[in-house]
């Protein structure tokens, strides 16, 4: 077994040490070569609270191993079953998320320069198949990343990713290394265990080099995906919690734009394929056409782009009209009396004395009408269409209205009925 440690010369490396054979082999290899490369070694162990006494015995084994080697150990205890239930996630998924959180924490607190994990070629093969079975659109075919950047000089690294499980077992035997067996690794109710035992184990009898072959394929797929994702990043744009994907992109770039949009909106996994058919259908659809996507997302054809967003309900209160500050969602409407400005800027200015008694500040209602600045009365809905304000945003514009007559669309325009003129005495400034 060979690991190139040249990039880690004179660095601090923390090994994720579970006590299993893979991590013990990595730990031992690093210790055996640390002096040659000037590497400072530490270890981290995470007790997940999943397997009771067996899991605690694994952590005790790790403590003894580190103590006998004179290696500092960082120990973390988490309650994965409870946090998984609260998050509505699977135990495996939550356990991986907790480990990643802890590794990032170690690096961000400058306790190490690198965290090494013992993922190997067999793990990578399982991940590729798992992603394909689950539904992936490019990124998942790349398998496990060789490294994850936490900052410019801090990384989580998988240095054994190109090494097969057989080589690791040979190394353990040659070095007479003791290690712990996780009994849950044989439980095929877990998806990855099922793939390992029921799919890949039989395949190995026919294709003994499958781990290496899948590794080579996944590296090529990863390089292709990274290149196409870089192209997609130049095409997609974001505004607040919305993503905008241009229409007419090549399909491979469009798919990566979808992945970037979904990841930005809060879903890290590559479930892009579940969203693709609906999004592709919008490319030739009429403007304003909507489709529902997985994960509570919505997409809409918006001119020459497709907007992807998480629909929000506008829970906006109704206020009596007057001076003050009024909260609408996460924005504030400020209304104040000011001197007549020399320059109008981006705020709206209106004649305070032209608003009738009984006006309120509220969101839009069916039947609202608006006398546009400069003349021309029309339905508020038609005004929004003319101004190209998307349907999904219209509820979030506070209105000053009495009955169905709208005197100001705050953030957009005042009515011609309340405009300033030569007789204006009191000027209201409306900032949204």
Image (spheres, rainbow, N blue to C red):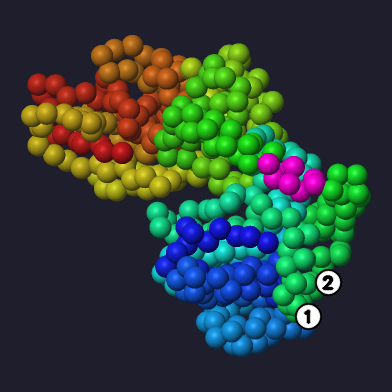
Q: Image check: 264 left or right of 77?
A: left
Q: Image check: 212 left or right of 371?
A: right
Residue at horizontal 40%, vertical 54%?
A: 152
The numbered mark at residue 54 is 1
Label 1 SS: helix
Disc 1 residue crowd, few under 14, some 14–19, many 20+, Cα 10 Å = some
Q: How many badges with numbers are in the image?
A: 2
- Looking at the picture, does residue 388 appear above or below residue 351? above
The residue nearer to you, when weighing 343 against 70, is 70
x%, y% of residue 274?
A: 70, 35
x%, y% of residue 287?
A: 54, 16
x%, y% of residue 100?
A: 58, 62
The numbered mark at residue 98 is none
Report which residue position mark 2 lands on. Answer: 183
Residue at horizontal 47%, vertical 21%?
A: 381
Residue at horizontal 27%, vertical 18%?
A: 373
Quadrant where the N terminus is found in the figure: bottom right
Closer to the chain start, of discs 2 and 1, is 1
Q: What segment carries the magenta color?
A: 209-216
């Amino acid at each position: 077994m060979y690991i190139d440690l040249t990039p880690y010369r004179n660095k601090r490396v923390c090994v994720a040490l579970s006590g299993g054979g893979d991590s013990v082999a990595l730990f031992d290899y690093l210790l055996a070569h640390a002096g040659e490369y000037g590497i400072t070694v530490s270890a981290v162990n995470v007790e997940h609270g999943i397997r009771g006494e067996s899991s605690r015995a694994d952590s005790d084994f790790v403590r003894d191993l580190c103590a006998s080697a004179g290696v500092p150990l960082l120990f973390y205890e988490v309650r994965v079953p409870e946090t998984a239930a609260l998050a509505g996630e699977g135990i495996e998924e939550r356990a991986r998320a907790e480990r990643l959180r802890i590794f990032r924490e170690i690096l961000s607190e400058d306790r190490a320069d690198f965290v090494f994990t013992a993922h190997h070629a067999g793990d990578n093969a399982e991940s590729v198949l798992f992603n394909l079975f689950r539904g992936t659109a490019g990124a998942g075919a790349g398998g496990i990343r060789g490294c994850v950047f936490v900052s410019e000089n801090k990384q989580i690294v998988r240095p054994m990713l190109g090494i097969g499980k057989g080589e690791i077992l040979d190394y353990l035997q040659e070095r007479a290394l003791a290690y712990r067996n996780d009994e849950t690794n044989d439980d095929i109710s877990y998806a990855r265990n099922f793939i390992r035992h029921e799919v890949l184990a039989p395949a190995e009898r026919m294709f003994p080099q499958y781990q290496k072959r899948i590794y080579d394929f996944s590296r090529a797929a990863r390089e292709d995906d990274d290149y196409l994702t870089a192209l997609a990043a130049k095409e997609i744009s974001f505004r607040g919690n919305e993503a905008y994907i241009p229409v007419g992109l090549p399909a491979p770039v469009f798919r990566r734009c979808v992945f970037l949009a979904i990841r930005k909106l809060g879903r890290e996994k590559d479930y892009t394929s579940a969203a693709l058919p609906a999004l592709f259908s919008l490319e030739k659809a009429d403007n304003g056409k909507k489709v529902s996507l997985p994960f509570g997302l919505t997409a809409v054809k918006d001119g020459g782009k497709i907007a992807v967003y998480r629909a929000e309900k506008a829970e906006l209160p109704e206020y009596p009209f007057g001076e003050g500050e009024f909260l609408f969602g996460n924005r504030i409407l400020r209304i104040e009396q000011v001197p007549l400005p020399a320059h109008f800027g981006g705020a709206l200015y209106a004649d305070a004395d032209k608003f009738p008694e009984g006006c309120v500040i509220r969101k839009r209602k069916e039947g609202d009408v608006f006398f546009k600045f400069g003349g021309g009365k029309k339905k508020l809905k038609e005004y929004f269409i003319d101004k190209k304000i998307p349907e999904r945003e219209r509820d979030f514009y506070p209105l000053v209205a009495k009955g169905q007559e709208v005197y100001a669309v705050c953030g957009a325009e005042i009515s011609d009925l309340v405009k300033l003129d030569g007789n204006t005495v009191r000027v209201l400034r409306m900032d949204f």
